[in-house]
Amino acid sequence: MKRVKIIANPNSGRGAALGKILELIELMSHDKYEIELLFTHEEGDGKNFAANYTGEDFIICSGGDGTVNEVVNGIYLSKRDTPLAILQSGTVNDFANAQGLPTSPFKFYQMIKNYHIKTIDLGLAGDRAFINVAAGGMLTEIAYTVSAEKKASLGNMAYYLEGARELLEKRIFKYQKSINLKVKSDEIDESVDSLLFLITNSTSVGGFKRMSPFADVSDGYLDVLIFKRIKISDAPELFASLMGGKHIDHNKVIYLKTKNISIESDEEVTIDVDGEKTSTLPMNFKVLENRLKIIVP
């Protein structure tokens, strides 16, 4: 009999997580699973539940990117190799979508029964692990300005719409000051006048499925994108290339793979880790190779 711990955010996806979990438990009840069900209600619950080992053979996390990040950090801090299965039920679900993880409880149930394990890398932003992305600048501002209602009703489109508004109104038409970054790694050592930067582990960020088109969760590297300040005339071309994953060749984008990179700025820049606010620059980012086991189709 396998013992499984289910950690779920009941409010994720306008309550979709709760319905999915109940359907999954009904399916699992026909097999020999011993189930511990825990609901998150406040910040830190997911991390604490995952870090507290109660004999589980694997963990199921149901929620959005933020809930997944908490559970990942709990597993990371516990220094155990407990496999994780992600049942997506949030708004964007970048990592789960990039890995082709099932969205329906029945297909998810089939996945955990087959129990195929894949070992992947994690990123580390300061002292906080991330499974998908750490970011600073415009993209994080977009995420915080999109209302919960708009995210729930529009999904990924909310990020596209709010992103366009933010870029055109604040960063270009109003000539809001960009961020001066000092970036240092084995691959780069320079100052960049930047709109935003992304430290990615997988391909999808903010609903853009090919944000880091060459990212691989098991290659031992983080993929770094730094978007330089652009002129009004650059915007249409950059947006078009972004939709097709061709932006990494644009002259206003720096793209590289690295194992370790430090970023600092004279300004206060808040870092977003898998959709959740963490501390500010300066910060060091590094890859944690082969650090997490996930259950995949």
Image (cartoon, rainbow, N blue to C red):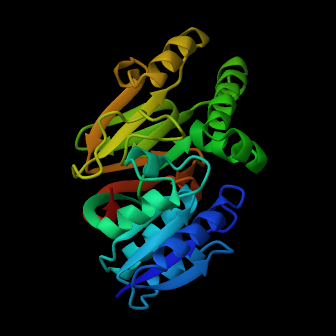
In the rendered image, the residue lying farthest to the top is: 233
Q: Residue 229: x, y in percent?
A: 53, 24
Residue nearest the observer in this picture, 184 or 223: 223
- From the viewer's perspective, tell me whether residue 229 is left or right of residue 78: right
Examine the rendering and report whether any part of residue 226 can be seen. yes
Q: Residue at (44%, 57%) from the top-left corner?
A: 107
- From the viewer's perspective, tell me whether residue 243 is left or right of residue 115: right
Q: Quadrant of the rendered structure where residue 253 is?
A: top left
Is 87 located above or below residue 198 in the figure?
A: below
Q: Residue 197: x, y in percent?
A: 47, 38
- From the viewer's perspective, tell me whether residue 123 is left or right of residue 63: left
Examine the rendering and report whether any part of residue 126 can be seen. no
For the N terminus, give its image quadrant.
Answer: bottom left
Is 78 located above or below residue 222 in the figure?
A: below
Q: Residue 73: x, y in percent?
A: 45, 70
In the rendered image, the residue lying farthest to the front is: 30
Residue nearest the observer in this picture, 156 or 137: 156
